[in-house]
Amino acid sequence: MAYAAMKPTKPGLEEPQEQIHKIRITLSSKNVKNLEKVCVDLVRGAKDKRLRVKGPVRMPTKVLHITTRKSPCGEGTNTWDRFELRVHKRVIDLLRLPLQILEDAMGQSLS
């Protein structure tokens, strides 16, 4: 088996590598239309600034159920109300952010 020869590097002489900064934005809402609109606006704004965008990734919808009695006192016929809350979630990843844009987004110095 042949192995590729690698040049040994001296400590301290390595080439400086650009750090890759990542931001993960997680959005959740019970209104799908508004959530999708915000996602489209975020992705469009990031692409205008020439950032790499991954997403929006649609996560599974959480459905929360509550079943409760209609009668406040517990007497009478057994009638029930069923309530449901659907929580929709989207994840957007911004990759390879320059340090200046990352500092502007966070509002503080990172150096």
Image: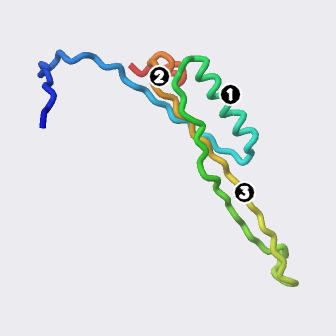
Which residue was labeled with disc 1? 41
Q: Marks 1 and 3: CB-CB under 8 Å?
A: no
Left or right: 30 in relation to 98: right
Residue sitting nearer the eye, 104 or 38: 38
Left or right: 44 in relation to 82: left
- Image location (x, y in percent) of residue 55: 57, 35
Q: Rounded to the nearest whole Å, what is the CA distance between mark 1 and mark 2? A: 18 Å
Q: Say which amino acid is labelled 3.
A: Leu
83 vs 74: above or below:
above
Q: Say which amino acid is labelled 1.
A: Asp
- Image location (x, y in percent) of residue 10: 12, 19
Which residue was labeled with disc 3? 85
For image coordinates 74% across by 45% down, the residue present is 31
For image coordinates 60% across by 37% down, the residue present is 56
Q: Earlier in the sequence, mark 1 or mark 2?
A: 1
Residue sitting nearer the eye, 45 or 72: 45
